[in-house]
Image (cartoon, rainbow, N blue to C red):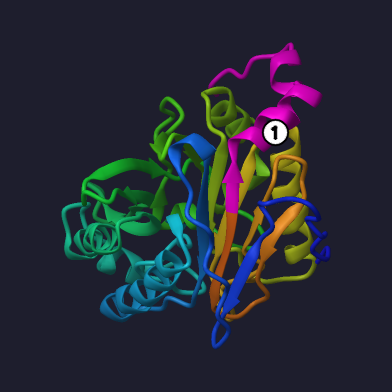
Amino acid sequence: MQSQQPAADRSSEGRTSTSGVSASPSEPTSATARALDIAVVQFDPYTDKDANLAMLREHVRDAAEHGARVVIAPEYSMFAVTRLDHRAVAAAEPLTGPYVTGLRGLAAEFGVHVVAGVAESTQDPERIHNTLVVAAPDAEFAAVYRKVHLYDAFGFLESDVVLPGPITDPVTFTADGVVFGLQTCFDLRFPEGFRRVAAAGAQVLLVPAQWIPGPAKVDQWTTLLRARAIENTVYVAAADQSAPRGAGASMIVDPTGMVLAELGDGTGIATARIELDHLDKVRAANPSLALRRFTIADA
């Protein structure tokens, strides 16, 4: 993994917190500061949905205590196995079910936006949607995104169990004046999807994932995250599952590709500050979004 670069003379320097280590609380932000703190959560969900929600609650509380206004949890935070099978279908719930209701309760309890991956039931009795839910501090839905690119690679066939999400307008939501866009795990390997969301106005791209471990997988993950940030001049915040079912390496990257905060393969949170003034300066120096000459057509 690429080592973290120092963020000298920058107020957006990342802060990390892992199990047993506390991060320094962030300074309060205001609307005029055009900034807010976010956190990525890295934990190890398995097959007990109640236990998964309880673990996530502790991390959301930790993130909120450190000033985060948006908290991003991994893909399949609700129910996780190493290889998807009928268990995920049996565990799936509608978005009105108890797990998503619990996520909405966490958002309201701690006054933050919570982003997490769930197994959403569908009309097909054999398959689910791999869905990201964004719960707002008022306990309402801020956004819902269903994963478009399924993990039919490296010997896995996610499509055996998961229906691909429909091609819709890019999914975004706004928190404290900052626009966030959503993509999931394997979507990371398809830059056109990220470009669509950035072109729709996203200033931060969120990537919940269960990045399955394997040879060179962490190098690919970190390289792709930084590339998506650089080419779209956006912040990228990626929350992976910890070992053993995920590769870890959750991180927050600034629009120049600098890693502001990152984790290893254990559980914990990483926090960093999103600064729109910094984003504006990067885009003024490198107006790649404005200079692009190609559009993206839906397949």
Q: Is residue 97 above or below residue 48?
A: above
Task: Indicate whether residue 189 is drawn in magenta.
Answer: no
Q: Which residues are magenta?
A: 273-299
Disc 1 crowd, CA 10 A, few/some/many (<14, 14-19, 20+) = many
Q: Is residue 153 above or below residue 34?
A: below
For label 1, the residue is 233
Q: Is residue 56 left or right of residue 293?
A: left
228 or 262, which lies in front?
262
Image quarter where the N terminus lies is bottom right
110 or 298, which lies in front?
110
Q: Is residue 238 above or below residue 190?
A: below
Q: Quadrant of residue 6?
A: bottom right
Q: Which residue type carries mark 1?
A: Thr
- Residue at 69 percent across and 50 percent down: it is 225
Task: Give the x, y percent position of residue 161.
Answer: 40, 57
Q: Quadrant of residue 240?
A: bottom right
59 or 222, which lies in front?
59
Q: Is residue 267 left or right of residue 107?
A: right
Q: Secondary structure at mark 1?
A: loop
